[in-house]
Image (cartoon, helix red, strand yellow):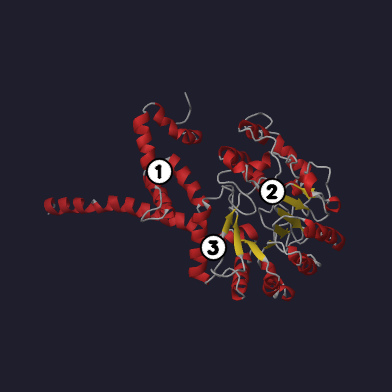
Amino acid sequence: MLQSLHKRHSELAESNRQLEILSNGIFEANELPKFKNKLAESQQFPLKARKLEILQINVGYMCNQVCAHCHVDAGPDRKEIMTKETMLQCLEVIKQTEAHTLDLTGGAPEMNPNFRWFVEEAAKAGIKDFIVRSNLTIIRANKKYHDLPDFFKTHNIHIVSSMPHWTKGKTDKQRGDGVFDKSIKALQDLNAVGYGIPESDFRLDLVYNPSGAFLPGNQMALEKDFKKSLLDEFDIHFHNLFALTNLPISRFLDYLIASENYEDYMYALVDAYNPKAVKNVMCTNTLSVSWDGFLYDCDFNQMLRLPVNSKTKHISEFNESLLEGRNIVISQHCYGCTAGAGSSCQGSVT
Amino acid sequence: MQKTYYDPADLKKFGKISDWNEELGSKFFEYYNAVFKEGALSEREKSLIALAVAHTIQCPYCIDAYTGDGLQRGITREEMMEALHVAGAIRGGASLVHGVQMMNKVNKLDL
């Protein structure tokens, strides 16, 4: 199994080193324009947060998988886990926020020992769309997780799961040996309780990330191919496919540098810059909460330790009106969300 | 003068061929874009055909473009290689089928 950057004591485990790489080299020499300047070209700098719609909470970086592209650098060795105390602070916010979507992520969020309690409590707030980002294999990882499909159904959770391809080869290459077979079984388990079935209210969406140094293709075309292959070969149904661009941070940045693809990839992202995607990027309507309760514009900024530009910086001092209209903190990794059709945790944005 | 006939950066300048003949260049790109839209064949199938043809005509720009396009569409390396073998089979077959002409002539002239 691949090891996390932290476990390997890689210099890229440090967010400052990642930010240096993203600001120096081709960007320092003005070979490529900085994201700030690109936004300014279309009069979109500074990028401002609108009304909060999506509250995304990262309940910990521990994961049973070590995926090659993971922007969290998650893995079994990561010990950053949200405490019950921080969860209680999050629950206070969940009860008062006007956000329509609550999005739990990780790591594997299910590995937080208080995950089920937190879901039960959060579900009581009655937020319209309650998402759990499940890596699928966790459902098959251990007996204690086998009943997760029923648990999710009981609390009307919307499942969003990563699946980089409909073939074993491409999936296992990105997510680890054996992941494809376990993911297929988990999807079948979810279908068996009603998730992902065409007319079902129990939403099951898949997330596609390219398994290499290239950008995702057309989301609708990919969804069609995924649906046909998964149905024909495994009798699996799901609702929508979200095509996400890999952002050049953490393990994906490590891969880009090691494979000598970094500069070409950054050129591809900058070439594909779409000013129309900017107004709908997720940081404009999302707030990301880290395992230790700090607030970020998105999950990527969380991993780069770029906190929100606001007086309210922690969930314990949450103030929705203070956060609205804040300037979004940006760097060159943001090109990943504005390339082509744009990219967000809900897929394309145009 | 550049030192090589092909520069990967030139692929991005393809659209510039219209600079010296706007009318024909525009017509070409309009046709090109229409060809690759989904029709009786899917865009994915057309991408694989383009990849095979790119190898048949040995166009480095086209190979670069349609390998990348295939990856973005989720086309696997197995599918890509099979498409190339189709190109190879037709190309090899095209040589070998002319062997019939050779054989005809030999059979006519040789004792």
> Quick one: SS at disc 3?
loop
Same chain shared by disc 1 and disc 2? no
Q: Which residue is mark 3?
A: A167
For the image, the number of numbered tags is 3
> Quick one: SS at disc 2?
loop
Could you say which disc has been placed on residue A231 in the image? none
Name the residue rendered at 37%, 52% in the picture: B88
> Residue A221: image x %, image y %?
49, 55
Amino acid type, label 2: Asn
- Residue A125 placement, left or right of A34: right
Sooner in the amino-acid sequence: mark 3 or mark 2 = 3
Amino acid type, label 1: Asn
Name the residue rendered at 64%, 60% in the picture: A175
> Residue A222: image x %, image y %?
51, 56
Q: Does residue A57 sit above or below B68 in this rendering?
A: below
> Quick one: SS at disc 1?
helix
Amino acid type, label 3: Thr
Q: Chain of mark 3?
A: A
State how far apart marks 1 and 3 are (Cα): 29 Å
Q: Which residue is mark 1?
A: B33
Q: Which residue is mark 2?
A: A285
- Residue A311 placement, left or right of A140: right
Residue A260 seen in this snapshot: no
Same chain shared by disc 1 and disc 3? no
State how far apart marks 3 and 2 are (Cα): 34 Å
Q: Does residue A197 sit above or below A252 in this rendering?
A: below
Mark 3 Cα-neighbour bin, 10 Å: few <14, some 14–19, many ≥20:
some
Q: Nearer the viewer, residue A292 or A153?
A: A153
